[in-house]
Image: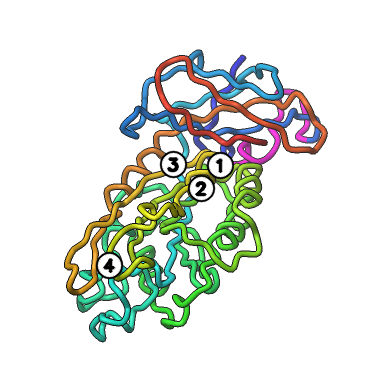
Amino acid sequence: MRRPFPSSATAAALAIGLMAAPGQSASQAPEIIRVDVMVQDISGNPVTGLAVEDFALWSEGQRLPIEIFQSPTDATPLTLVVLVDITASQLTCDLKVLPEPVVKTAGRGIPMAAATTADMGVWGWLPLNGFRRADRVQVGSAGRRLTLSGRFTSDVGEIIKDWRSLLAVPPVEGLGPSAIWDAVNDTVAVLAHAAGRRAIVLVTDGQATGNVQGQLEVSTRAALAGVSVSMVAEESMLPTYPLMTTMASHGIDPTRALTAMADVTGGSFGLARAEVANPESRCFTRDPEPIFRLVLEQLHQAYILGFVPQIRDGKPHNLDVRVSKPGIVRARKTY
């Protein structure tokens, strides 16, 4: 008999631990591997209303019985880290020509319009839009080092306070290197044993330098831990000044690595495109808010599947989630 995930804290334990059947001790219970599955249409909107019969799990050439199924309507809340790249390439203007209030915020990833207001330390959209009441949120910044807020919280006021503190860092933090893979790796370690549906949303332009860990290595580690990494990719024009053209137009596309990490871990990907605002001032604009909200909606609309692994040798194995109806499937590729 297929078992639904409970909505209580027990559900979180099932995601990373053992579940005992009646008459079984926890040590005798079969291991349940949990898989969060997002299904999207070609526009990136969540596909809802699917039943367990619409899904199939495959590994090492074998189809796996689905032991647990939970639809998005009764899914558990997110346990989420919003991780923001604050290095200088995230700026929307050339640092040399910025007014003094903006220079003081160098490398914090703050759009010029926000940085020149009285409250320079907050992207108002980020802590306020897209979260649900029961979500547990922690915010972090990736500069020369990773900085995370103290704890997961569902309190909006506390999230805003954490956000202000997070961005109130010395400008030197934005001068690089941009070790975003190392930052994701350390964040995965924080989430690995957390309760709920665990996810990272990384806001970055994808320009990674000075990393100890590689992108593929970190992606695999996140997938094995059941932590999805979704991307709000911000197109950067800064490295090509004074040409005012994108990196992609010169055959350099840092978002490829971001897409690869999202694919391996079962995360989502969205691109906030840059537009030239004023060539004379060498500034451009981008608005990540719609992408951020869509990514959160996709995460909230994930299905939850559970299966018992057929091979128990302590080694990584491939995982392929298929859907019989039209849709793009996003789920981790290994367990």
| Closer to us: 313 or 239 | 239
**Circle nearer the N terminus (1, 2):** 2
What residue did someone put label 2 on? 229
Magenta region: which residues?
Answer: 12-26
Q: Nearer the viewer, residue 292 or 242?
A: 242
Quarter of the figure with the N terminus? top right
Q: Amino acid at mark 3?
A: Ser
Q: Residue furthest bottom?
A: 100
Q: Which residue is mark 1?
A: 265
Q: CA distance from mark 4 to mark 3?
A: 23 Å
The disc label shown at residue 111, or none: 4
Q: Amino acid at mark 1?
A: Thr
Q: Is residue 79 visible?
A: no
Q: What residue is shown at x 53% (from left), y 32% (from top)?
A: 6
Q: Is residue 312 above or below residue 121?
A: above
Q: Earlier in the sequence, mark 1 or mark 4?
A: 4
Q: To which residue does mark 3 refer? A: 268
- Ranked by sequence position, the earlier of labels 2 and 4 is 4
Mark 1 vs mark 4, CA separation in Å: 29 Å
Residue 307 versus residue 321: which sits nearer the camera?
A: 321
